Image: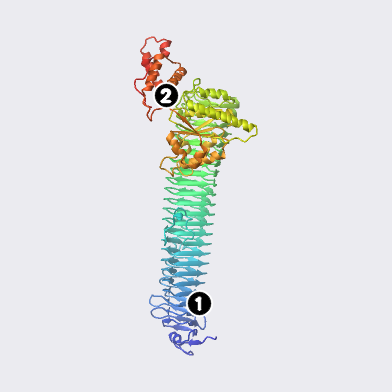
Amino acid sequence: MKQSVVRVAERGWGTHRTVAAAVRAAADGAVVSLQPGTYHESLVIDRDVTIVAAKGPGTVRIAPGRGAAVSVSGGAPVLRHLDLAGGGGGPALLIRGGSAEVEACTVTAGSVEVGHDARAALRDCTVRDVPGDGVRVTGTAVAALTGCTLGPVGRHGVHVDDGARVELRGTRVAQSAACALALTGTSTVTADDCFFGECSDAAVRVAGPARLLLHNCRLHGAGTHGLQGENAVLDARTQPTEPPSAEGAGSAAGRADSSIRLERCEILRTGREGVYLAGESDARLTDCHLTEVGEAAIHVTGNSRLVLERVRAVDLPGTALAVGASAEVLATGCVFARVGANGLYGSGSSLTILTECEMSTTAYSAVHLQGGARAELRTCVVLDSAQHGVRVEHGAHLTALDSRIERAGLSGLDVEEGDALVRRCSVSACATGVRLRTRHRPLLDTCEVRSVRRTGVEIGTGTGATLTNCVIEDCETSGVFFEKDSEGWVDGTVIADVRGSGLVVWSGSRPRVYSTRVRGAAKNGVYAHDEAAGVFEDCTVTDTRYPALYVGANASPMFRNLLVHDTQEDLSSHADSEPVFERCRSENVTIPTMPADTVDEREPAVRGSRPTTLLENSPRAEEPAAEESLPGLLDELDRLVGLERVKQEVASLAKVMRMVKQRQEAGLQPPPLARHLVFAGNPGTGKTTVARLYGRILAALGMLTHGRLVEADRAALVGEYVGHTAPRTTAVFRRALGGVLFIDEAYSLVPPGQGSDFGQEAVATLVKLMEDHRDDVVVIVAGYPDDMDRFLGSNPGLASRFTRTLSFDDYSSADLVRIVEHQARLHEYSLRADTVTGLTAYFDAMERTERFGNGRTARQAFQRMTELHAQRVADLESPGPEDLTLVLPRDLPSEVLHS
């Protein structure tokens, strides 16, 4: 149907002289055609009419003296090719109802306001020279801007408030005195292929629970123009309409639909941060690019959550990503490169998780964590940092998995009073590989440190660190350096081709080093400085230019089952050194001076094993020899003092094991077998001695490779922090393969009333390892009877694997006397018959309280007897041989010992 046309002209040819008159006269759907000119009137439209400039854009101007040029209160009007100018400082175009279309119009001297429940579509329009907001949308109104240009304006370019919704496409918003785009209330804005920038405040600001989606947009700041671009490009201070769920509270990925989303956007040349999130903001950036921002590219603080996917923040004067307060950031596939400060800076109690990200060419440390900040690096790359690759300090915590750190100007990883769990990572071409100075216990598991200009791993004063299954090679100085009074646990590690010493242990340090190989050191393989200590067990040292081992003055390291081979000299030691050697050997060494064994007179706690004084004819139970006979071992078992029921059960187990072995050799299936045991009894009842003998018996039967005993307790198995326990337990278990793992006071792994204790993780790890290596190891758990029942009930897998309990009774007085007599023979004393009688009475009178130490009590009694004997003999003028050896009743202690 042909539209009717109503013509308007100020003078000359035309039907009407005013636009208002023409609109009143026009029928619904009519076209009101305006001849060129300026119309000084304020239109109010509530009809379905089209108002159009007859001669095209720039020919018709509607400019009232006061009020809006056009007010739409209803209907579906169309405005085309008009210039609208506001009067009196108010809006130039006011749409408060109906559904208006505005095409190719220019709005000046007043804003475009869309409110209430109105609908508005602006296409190819220009809004400029406006004292306030360029476009303001409020209420529940809905507006769409396509191909529009906004600016300059005196406040926000586009301001969306209340519950309004706005869609922008191909629109440019620039030269605003405040923000280019501002969202408040519960408004929603989507923008595609738009430009926001050249403004004095943030290019885009979101405040309150508003929602924003920008796709393929450019957010360009003000650069050097006055105050323009002084705030963040994306400045979000949102408050969520609903609290986060429990699932989302602990992870930046907890919310599937972020309230702020940027996709394929570009952010550059801002006066301050590129992205700034505070309060309870929740944002997601995907495939975005940030560069040339004034401060941090991305700054997240408060309780904000941010997800970054394939974001590039490059060529920056400051930090790429700063995360503080309680904020959480989850970044995947991101690149932070060529930055003037940190790649990631974490502080407060923030959490940052980086997956498959790259941080490179940073002027400060690539990753810097402090305070209570936490960060996880998963399959990340850290390259070319001028300072540290990763720096963790003052209570911060790092978890790094499957990541690389290369070419750091200082340390690849530097931990100072923080904590770190590092697994399957590599550090290379740095000044120092790893530097640890903390009261916490960092863990490096299955890591590589290569080609560093100084030390591979430095463990600072007072630091206790754990290294398991690591490779440290090609270091300019030492491989691992234990500084003064440090501790540490090194297991299954290779140290190779270092220009200094492989392992350096400084004064007061007490590391425990197991199953570690040192080869190709230009100096010593192990250098123990003056007054150093520690345990080195099942280690190998080869191809060193200096002596394989150096032990300084008053140093007392323990070397157990150590092999030195293919080197010039095995040992150089100070005259006042006190090293201890057990089952050590040298092969193909030009100058061999290292003893195979020495007698260790130190306390058992230093050696890591308890002395055994229960055997009749041997000063201590030796580790299994290459070939031991079952009859000889059973005879040795029988000579133990007391323990009659235990000896019978062990002998019975030996018969069962022998029958199992015979069936296997005959090609028959073995019967169900209870290899793992519970030893229930009070302290000092010979549990460790029997465990050691049991391992040797199984080795003699061919059921175990060597039968050697490895002792452990809670401290050896349980870490202090999340992620430390399983590797520590696994390392101890691995050392026991082929032998017996003896866990004393095993019930301490599951303290009563502490269901979340890390000991539960140790138990679960043990259960799995026992299943995986069921034929390679025997596990014996020991402790007080009642506590062991609780221990077995703490995990369903324990009760099914420990089906046999051996009860160790307390020693009788006669047993204790036999132990004292054994001690006397070892130390060349003799006891008269009446002395033995008095000693029996002494033990009979002793209270058997919780502090009663059984065999330990007997040893303490003997020690007291020798002290009293020495005091008596010292008063004799010329004591004879009998005086020096004979213990009399008067040498018995008068007091009753309780422990």
Q: Identify which residue, 487 or 826, lies in the foreground.
A: 826
Q: Is residue 595 visible?
A: no
Q: Is residue 254 above or below residue 590?
A: below
Amino acid on which the number 1 mark rests in the picture = Glu
Assess disc 1: are there few (<14), some (14-19) or many (≥20) residues with their C-alpha within 10 Å of its C-alpha. many
Assess disc 2: are there few (<14), some (14-19) or many (≥20) residues with their C-alpha within 10 Å of its C-alpha. some
Q: Position of residue 173 (x, y in %)?
A: 48, 68
Q: Is residue 187 visible?
A: yes
**SS class of the residue under badge 1?**
strand
The residue sitting at 42% across, 40% down in the picture is 751
Numbered label attached to residue 812: 2
Q: Is residue 590 above or below residue 726?
A: above
Q: State which quarter of the image contains the N terminus.
A: bottom right
Q: Earlier along the polypeptide chain: callout 2 or callout 1?
A: 1
> Dots 2 and 1: beta carbons under 8 Å?
no
- Residue found at the far right of this picture: 667
Q: Identify which residue, 207 or 647, lies in the foreground.
A: 647
Q: Position of residue 601 (x, y in %)?
A: 46, 24
Q: Identify which residue, 570 or 892, lies in the foreground.
A: 892
Numbered label attached to residue 428: none
Question: Dividing the picture into quarters, in which one does residue 42 lie?
Answer: bottom left
**SS class of the residue under badge 2?**
loop
Q: Is residue 739 left or right of residue 63?
A: right
Q: State which quarter of the image contains the C terminus.
A: top left
The residue sitting at 47% across, 77% down in the picture is 100
Numbered label attached to residue 103: 1
Q: Is residue 372 above or below residue 175?
A: above
